[in-house]
Image (spheres, helix red, strand yellow):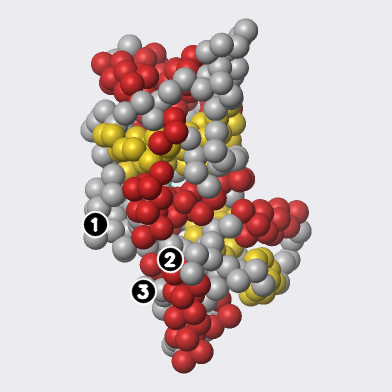
Amino acid sequence: MPDEGEGQAAPDDRVLEGETGQDFGDEPSQDFESEVKQVGKMYDDGVLIFSREGLQSIAHEVQRCRDESGIHTLAHLAIDGNIVEYPAPQRRDKYGQTKTNEIWPYVWYRSIEEMTELGFIFGDAKMARLSAHISSVYWETDEDEPPGLAPSSPAQDLRRRFDETRSGWEASEHYSQVKKLIASAIKPVTHRLKLVGFACGVIDQYESSAMQHRALAQHVMLTGIRSFLSSLSAPDGPSTPEVQCYVQDPSNTDLSKQVLHASGLTVLDDPMGFLEVDEHSVVVSIAPDVPIKQIVADLGRPAAMIWNEIHEDDARSTDPASSRVKEMLARDYVGVDFPHHEDAANKLVLWVRKDLALL
Ligand SMILES: C[S@@+](CC[C@H](N)C(=O)[O-])C[C@H]1O[C@@H](n2cnc3c(N)ncnc32)[C@H](O)[C@@H]1O
């Protein structure tokens, strides 16, 4: 399981416990080491690690995994533009049984640090140029697990909790601070903005736990930011265009999806959320298990991002800020601390693209 970065949330065991079931080879070979060096060189030369075409190719393969059973080989675009084939994972747990709490297909993304400095997780040279691979993860239940795991709460209970959390937050000082910050930081725009939220957690897990509370708080924050962004968009237009809000978190259960959908959020499967990121997007990403900052920096220049503050020594975190991310932020964005809410998220920063910044 990748390390969590300092200042990020506790790891989410539901997703990352378990085995990939894929055998990529033994010790790193000389070929592999020279491939890793090549990847470092390509990165320095500006080759995209997470290109739109690469993500589209993963999306295509993910769909094939959903549509077909008994897949033996997976294949998608590597960073050099070539298709790489690799064996599909065993979809059995360590006892050889069908996995009960499985997420399939699950995309493992690799930061540039993982591909180069920490690159020896696969010994197979042909995998070295892949910044993602498709796998199967599962989590085990044991006696120590907190009671009340999903889907213990019926949809209407969860919906009620969501609505209560929302009305509570909308009446809070934190929401006023968030609105004030956005109004003072982002220029009104004449086109439609969209909000894309990543890794906001699972709202129907560990009933009444801090993790559930955070997931509810983060989704509710999205709905609040969406309403406020709607009033900022197209100030001269005849009517306020609706700001679409997309969310992507592969751990979402059917129940979570149902309640989020009923609350006006569009739930997307991984990697479709990434494909929504463009220059009109406001990206929200909180303590993700994947290198979202690096994916976003390769995809383009969103209108704004709200994500965890950057730590200098974050190379081994799940969402490290690579040199490319730091350059993007320094050159094209203005950053300001996002109002802190200890129970909802770790420290966040709002980054606004310079042409839209009032700061
Ligand atoms: C450490 S948890 C943080 C959850 C929540 N944001 C919080 O602060 O408590 C990491 C989250 O990243 C999510 N995640 C993993 N892969 C992802 C992906 N490809 N896209 C979006 N979210 C992802 C996990 O499912 C999990 O909910």
Residue at 44% of width from left, 33% of height from top? 355
Mark 1 residue's CB less than 8 Å from ligand 1: no
* CA neighbours of label 3 inside 10 A, class few (<14), some (14 to 19), many (20+): some
Badge 1 element: loop
The furthest residue to the top = 238
Residue 312, numbered label: 1
Q: Name the residue under label 3.
A: 117
Residue at 31% of width from left, 63% of height from top? 315
**Picture layout, residue 315 above or below residue 218:** below
Q: How far apart are marks 2 and 3 (CA)?
A: 8 Å
Callout 3–callout 1 Cβ contact below 8 Å: no
* CA neighbours of label 2 inside 10 A, class few (<14), some (14 to 19), many (20+): many
Residue at 31% of width from left, 38% of height from top? 335
Badge 3 element: loop
Quadrant location, the N terminus: bottom left
Mark 1 residue type: Glu
Residue 112, numbered label: 2
Whole-percent x, y for residue 204 in the image: 45, 34
Mark 3 residue type: Glu
